[in-house]
Amino acid sequence: MNVDQIILNLEKKHPGEKEYLQAVKEVLESIEETYNENPQFETAGIIERLIEPDRVITFKVPWSDDEGNIHVNLGYRIQFNNAIGPYKGGLRFHPSVTLSILKFLGFEQIFKNSLTTLPMGGAKGGSDFNPKAKSKSEIMRFCQSFMLELWHNIGADTDVPAGDIGVGGQEIGFLYGMYKKLARKHTGVFTGKGLNWGGSLIRPEATGFGNVYFAKEMLQTIGESFKDKTVSISGFGNVAWGATRKATEFGAKVVTLSGPDGYIHDPDGISGEKIDYMLELRATNEDIVEPYAKAFKSARFFPGKRPWEANVDIALPCATQNELNADDATDLVNNEVICVCEGANMPCTPEAIEIFHNNKILFGPGKAANAGGVATSGLEMTQNSMKIGWTREEVDNKLHQIMRDIHHACQTHGKQNNGYVDYVKGANIAGFLKIANAMLDQGLV
Ligand code: NDP
Ligand code: 2IT
């Protein structure tokens, strides 16, 4: 495999899709050696077939606001690969959404879902719709219009969407309601559903909990734990909330959270009622974290800054892609951070990851470290198929075990001769082998 040539060709076909090219390049570079050791992959054209989505569905989403003004947004679903199970992955509603961002997310999802050991293919979708400052009825009308187009393409055994940035329980409810009306079926076609209508316990917490479980496994390899460590977390959404809760439960002190307006530093730790306050902040539908500093006197707000300048032992980036760059990585290393574990998808730039690797910092890539969300979605699908509901404890134990297994798979494929584990390499190889072998078994389709 000639990675540079493949990327060059891909760039020619898809000019300007920088996040997608970034994600593909990272995977190809780390699986190159394994790929070349298996000439059957090259003969079957596995890479060329894997890096292009099976199909890209795009549509317009017209909706009217509360004043009767008409708006038109773009809607997408990228069905990337279904070699090991139905297409599976979240929907993102955010004004920054582009085809490139959804293709990178869909591509990453293939490997992440493979790592969970559950039968799920990779997909992603969403819209450039901005749910911020919209009324509940505007969000409902948007979701209904979005589903009018998408419903033909999804199904419990075909493609199962879920949440992501800007899509939480409320949006899944509106989307599912419209699907149910159109399809005249009540099936497990979404995950992240409400508990009364097919949802799973622990799903809301799962990504953040899983992220901390994964970091715990990494820390154990150097005889460390979360106990008495300081932790910086970015974002204040679903993933950040779950990670803050679990890290606090494990005895750590979470000292930051952030939004596009800046970050909060709270040296007393974000625990108890302060974690509940994160939910209130989200519910205000505003784009800011600053009110936290007004509500809790121990906190200081740093406008326009990112939390990576804070002096911490562990960093969990939980907001969005490319939010931690080389300068931020250098700040963290200078402050003697021991572990960086991605809760978001691709939050660290390639240059930042290189700095962590060069300094032998424990680094957990998102496709492994945030797989707990989709893994629990897989558990929700299983419960729907069996028409039963597991207890909180049952789901949490299964999630914990899955994260341990993913960590083990990363170690198996990522351990270097000097003992340092390259988790990026480990996750990419472990995820890739299962998909590539499934594609080989199924012929040229
Ligand atoms: P939410 O919408 O709940 O939260 C996203 C958070 O990131 C918000 O606090 C948001 O603030 C903040 N944010 C968005 N853009 C920026 C930015 N440019 N700078 C700083 N902060 C920003 O989404 P989730 O918590 O669900 O998702 C967070 C990340 O985790 C994403 O990368 C997502 O792909 C990933 N992920 C999510 C999973 C899930 O199950 N939900 C599973 C695995 C990964 P604001 O909204 O105010 O802009
Ligand atoms: O990025 C992700 O893994 C998610 N947003 C969750 C996807 C899912 O199907 O649960």
Image (cartoon, rainbow, N blue to C red):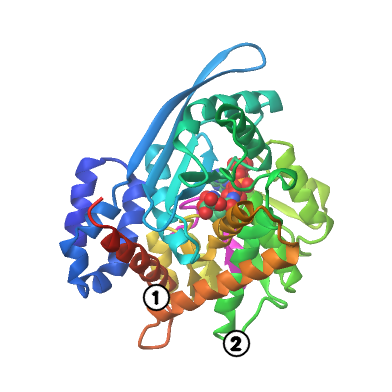
Mark 1 → mark 2, Cα distance in angstroms: 21 Å
Q: Which residue is mark 2?
A: 223
Give the residue pinned by disc 1: 358
Residue 229 coordinates in the image, percent (x, y) = 68, 75
Which of the pair 79/257 is nearer the observer? 79
Looking at the picture, how far across and down is residue 21, in whole percent?
31, 50
* Residue that extends furthest to the top in the rendered view of this protein: 68
* Nearer to us: label 1 or label 2: 2
Q: Is residue 309 magenta?
A: yes
> Is 246 drawn above or below residue 109 in the view shown?
below
x and y percentages locating residue 194 in the rendered image: 71, 44
Image coordinates for residue 75, horizontal then vertical, percent: 46, 31
Magenta-colored span: 306-325
Is residue 189 shown in magenta? no
Front-lying residue, 223 or 338: 223
Decide: few, some or many residues near mark 1? Use Cα within 10 Å; few <14, some 14-19, many ≥20: few
Query: What residue is at 53 percent from the left and 37 percent from the top?
Result: 94
